[in-house]
Amino acid sequence: MSKNILIVGGSSGIGAASLDALAEDNHIYSLTRTGCSDTPRENVIYETADVCSDNFDISFLPDVLDAVIYCPGTINLKPFTSLSREDFQNDLNINLMGFVKVIQACIPALKKSKNASVVAFSTVAVSQGMPYHASVAAAKGAMEGLVRSLAAEYAANHIRFNCIAPSLVNTPLASQFTKSESKLETISKRHPLNRIGEPRDIASATKYLISDESSWMTGQVVHIDGGLSSIKQLT
């Protein structure tokens, strides 16, 4: 059955891959800072907004919303003593507070759906404790806690909340790590499956989490990370 789906950050990376995976059979509302995609699709409504702005507006959405996919993120890797308070605040604003604004605005429409689903994105660094990830891991860790809390609070309203925690994915946001062949090879070897993720890997899981096939799944953090969080390699 066709669903009304809001994708926040659907212009590139995981968001764009999720839009491509879902657009054919659903009604998509794409909300980004830049608005329309370079290759717009007929069945996608594109709107421009900044989730960090106080003038955030989603009045263009339908009365009933079946899913929200929140994709904005940051990769701000520095030694802890090199991170400013502004760095921490910026990561919190984009990863956590933007998500809070979107979900608070969408709750009335989500409540009208018979099986609503919200998908957010964390990082493997929350569970693994990686160096130089203090700011982003703090922000994403807060998001994981919020997702579990909202899953409990809105279970009676049949709104499911789940989170995907990837390792490094080949997106424009991660280009600083993927544009160098030697650096990419080093990072790939850290993963048991010997490669970094592709946006389609995460989009496939996203599609499942908003489908009715996952209707008994909520409050989960799903690790799609090439085995990095669960497999220890012998050296």
Image (cartoon, rainbow, N blue to C red):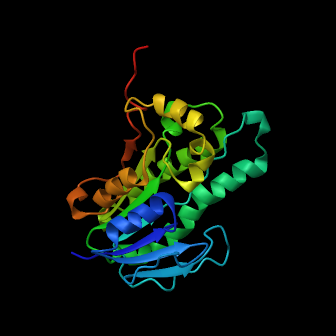
Look at the picture and state if 81 lies above or below 2. above
Quick one: which residue is furthest to the front in this view?
Answer: 181
User: Image quadrant for the C terminus?
Assistant: top left
| Viewer-closest of 6 and 188 | 188
Look at the picture and state if 148 lies above or below 177. below
**Residue at (45%, 40%) from the top-left corner?**
196
> Residue 80: image x %, image y %?
73, 35
Disc count in the image?
Answer: 0
User: Image quadrant for the N terminus?
Assistant: bottom left
**Residue at (54%, 62%) from the top-left corner?**
99
Quick one: which residue is furthest to the top in this view?
Answer: 235
Rendered image quadrant of residue 44: bottom left
**Residue at (36%, 47%) from the top-left corner?**
220
> Residue 204: image x %, image y %?
32, 55
> Residue 183: image x %, image y %?
59, 35
> Residue 215: image x %, image y %?
23, 59
| Viewer-closest of 121 and 227 | 227
| Side of 162 relative to 180 (left or right) | left
| Side of 194 relative to 75 (left or right) | left
**Residue at (49%, 49%) from the top-left corner?**
170
